[in-house]
């Protein structure tokens, strides 16, 4: 067992001792309410006795990412391994990549309907069902990863997140963060906002609304379809994540210019979602274990991207010949203004989105002044000639 898992397991163990004797959750002998018959006649959740003699919860976890894809795809696998070890096999999760069990963009529906007990993706992929979900994934020119986590866990964000998903029988957690992303891959230089006119670009969420305001056409595609779409001309440009993932997808083979900063995704939060009935079927100590394991998942992903992005960027530029470009200041200013318009328009269309926007904006206004005199000023000083 790794040091990290040892420490986490010790914490879970102490919590379990206190909770096991006075569990207020569902009776341990009940099966989850999310059992669904599959085409082969099996159920999505089977209850059996594990080595410890306790009930075993066999769950499916569906994702929007290719299986074992760096960062995004390996995080759910690590979560499954951690939960299996932390619970002595009581929670046994099988992870499915995009399309293995359900299509990539149907993860939310699969968890809501009980086809799978868990899912991993990004909230903006199901904005058609939950418009407010976009505030819980990323907002153009919005919160950084560090600020976002502050809003989630100490600013009321998580409570609103769960309120938004409650009608669908889904419980969400922040399930990782990529940090500030890159601005995208293009086959022409972007010297002004006018250069975005007529551009078909893979860009999800509110960022897509901003592109539309700039005269472009946003396209929502899962990651596994991006390369072919760009190669065949279905799209003219794309954003994905950052160097660590973009190198893995080989996007440098079909696009010449790589732009920064990722104004549209300044701290993109992934999400881990759980079917509410399945979660409620767990005894209290296992619910707490899930919570701790997902919190670890959330922190670990950001650390991984922080460690991996620059070495991948260096390879892209120095070895692959990618042309790195910065969006012009004037273009960024205009995109920021368009972003403010897009966010306000979203809040006006949906009551839950309006509540999320008000909370998000209030927290941003509280924390940004300190970010400016701390993180921002320090980075500027560190970079000074």
Image (cartoon, rainbow, N blue to C red):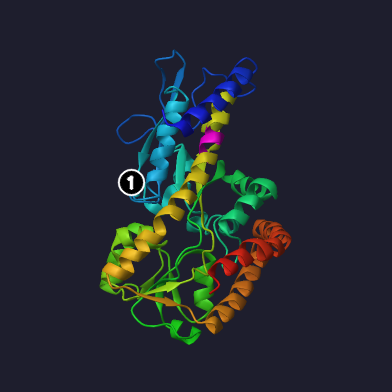
Count of labels in the image: 1
Q: Residue furthest front?
A: 385
Give the quarter of the image for residue 244.
Answer: bottom left
> Can you identify the residue that label 1 sits on?
68
Circle 1: element type: loop
Decide: few, some or many residues near mark 1? Use Cα within 10 Å; few <14, some 14-19, many ≥20: some
**Along the horizontal axis of the image, is 331 left or right of 90?**
right
Q: Position of residue 359 (x, y in %)?
A: 70, 57
**Along the horizontal axis of the image, is 72 left or right of 336?**
left
Q: Position of residue 99 (x, y in %)?
A: 33, 49
Which quadrant of the rendered structure holds the N terminus? top left
Q: Looking at the image, which residue is at 62% across and 56% down? A: 147
Does residue 281 appear anywhere in the picture? no
Query: Which range of residues does the magenta coloring cover?
Result: 290-294
Give the quarter of the image for residue 371.
Answer: bottom right
Above or below, 75 relative to 251: above
Q: Looking at the image, which residue is at 55% across and 40% down? A: 295
The main secondary structure of the magenta stretch is helix
Q: Nearer the viewer, residue 375 or 211?
A: 375
Q: Is residue 18 magenta?
A: no
């Amino acid at each position: 067992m790794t040091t990290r898992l040892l420490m986490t397991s010790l914490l879970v163990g102490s919590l379990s001792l206190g909770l096991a004797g006075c569990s207020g959750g569902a009776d341990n002998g009940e099966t989850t309410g999310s059992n669904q018959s599959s085409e082969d006649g099996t159920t999505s959740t089977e209850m059996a006795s594990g080595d410890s003699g306790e009930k075993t919860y066999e769950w499916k976890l569906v994702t929007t990412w290719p299986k074992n894809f760096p960062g995004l795809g390996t995080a759910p696998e690590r979560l499954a391994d951690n939960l299996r070890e932390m619970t002595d096999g009581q929670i046994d999760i099988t992870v499915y990549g995009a399309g293995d069990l359900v299509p990539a963009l149907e993860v939310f529906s699969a968890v809501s309907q009980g086809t799978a007990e868990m899912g991993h993706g990004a909230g903006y992929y199901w904005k058609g069902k939950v418009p407010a979900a976009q505030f819980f994934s990323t907002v153009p020119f919005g919160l950084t990863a560090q600020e976002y986590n502050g809003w989630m866990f100490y600013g009321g964000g998580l409570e609103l997140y769960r309120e938004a998903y409650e009608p669908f029988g889904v419980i969400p957690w922040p399930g990782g963060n990529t940090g500030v992303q890159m601005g995208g891959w293009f086959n022409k230089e972007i010297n002004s906002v006018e250069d975005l006119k007529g551009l078909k670009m893979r860009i999800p969420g509110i960022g897509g609304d901003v592109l539309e305001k700039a005269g472009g056409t946003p396209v929502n595609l899962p990651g596994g379809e991006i390369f072919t779409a760009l190669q065949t001309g279905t799209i003219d440009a794309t954003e994905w994540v950052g160097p660590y993932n973009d190198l893995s997808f080989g996007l440098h083979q079909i696009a010449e210019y790589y732009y920064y900063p990722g104004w549209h995704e300044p701290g993109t939060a992934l999400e881990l979602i759980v079917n509410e009935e399945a979660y409620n079927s767990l005894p209290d100590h296992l619910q707490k274990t899930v919570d701790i394991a997902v919190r670890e998942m959330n922190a670990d992903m950001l650390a991984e991207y922080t460690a991996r992005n620059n070495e991948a960027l260096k390879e892209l530029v120095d070895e692959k010949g990618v042309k790195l470009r910065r969006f012009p200041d004037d273009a960024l200013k205009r995109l920021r203004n368009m972003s403010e318009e897009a966010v306000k328009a979203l809040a006006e269309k949906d009551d839950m989105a309006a509540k999320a926007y008000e909370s998000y904006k209030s927290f941003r206004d509280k924390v940004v002044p300190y970010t400016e005199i701390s993180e921002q000023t320090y980075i500027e000083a560190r970079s000074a000639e």
